[in-house]
Amino acid sequence: MGYDSAATRSRLLDAAYDEFVERGLAGARVDRIAAAAQANKQAIYAYFGSKENLFDAVLAARLGVLADEAPFDPDDLPGYAGALFDALAATPGLMRLTQWSRLERSDATPGEIESHRAKAQAVRKALDLPDDLAATDILEIVIAIATTWVNMPAGLKTTTSARQRIHRATVVAATEAIIKAL
């Protein structure tokens, strides 16, 4: 059986996700990632160049999955908020990964910035807002509302499915109220 570079790369991304979620960029160790991926450390550098580039690749891959699970629809921001809530509630590690990124880096990645700008422009058009700044504010408020559940300390959220459904309905209703108030 020959070497499967795609499988190795995939294992590295999965192992790195777990390591970065748990320990962040600064605390992550390439030797632990390599061991968990059943690969050698040199593979990390061959595929990604550095631990920082591996972090960026993990973040980009996971945000891509999130975009598939919660498709952005500027004409249905309440639906988007609900889908984003669902996706993040199902994978709380992604929120933790983005929090590590914010703690350990001075800015978002160029891909994240472009994604948010494009979404804000779509929100501006859909809601007939005066400028991109107003649209960015609306977009970021909707995202903040949708991420509240995942960010809440465990002691403040009773993690029953009934409570989660109520919180989701509140996320959607709050987003609807914001749009109605415009």
Image (spheres, helix red, strand yellow):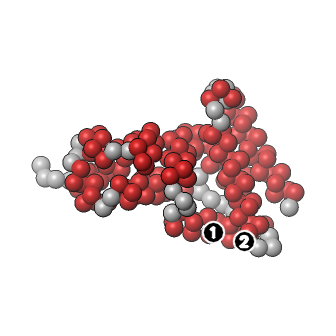
Q: Residue at x 57, y 66 (%)?
A: 113
Determine the secondary structure under disc 2: helix
Height in image: 29 above or below 113? Answer: above
Q: Is residue 98 visible?
A: no
Name the foreground residue: 140 vs 127: 140
x and y percentages locating residue 28 in the rendered image: 38, 44
* Disc 2: which residue: 132
Task: Determine the CA span between mark 1 and mark 2.
Answer: 8 Å
Q: Residue at x 71, y 64 (%)?
A: 136
**Direction from residue 66 to residue 18 in the image, left or right:** left
- Label 2 CA crowd tier, 10 Å (few <14, some 14–19, many 20+): some
x and y percentages locating residue 83 in the rendered image: 63, 48
x and y percentages locating residue 151 in the rendered image: 63, 40
- Label 1 CA crowd tier, 10 Å (few <14, some 14–19, many 20+): some
x and y percentages locating residue 88 in the rendered image: 58, 44
Name the foreground residue: 154 vs 104: 104
Which disc is residue 134 wearing? none
In the image, what residue type sits under mark 2? Answer: Asp
In the image, what residue type sits under mark 1? Answer: Arg
Q: Earlier in the sequence, mark 1 or mark 2?
A: 1
* Disc 1: which residue: 117
Disc 1 + disc 2, Cβ < 8 Å:
yes
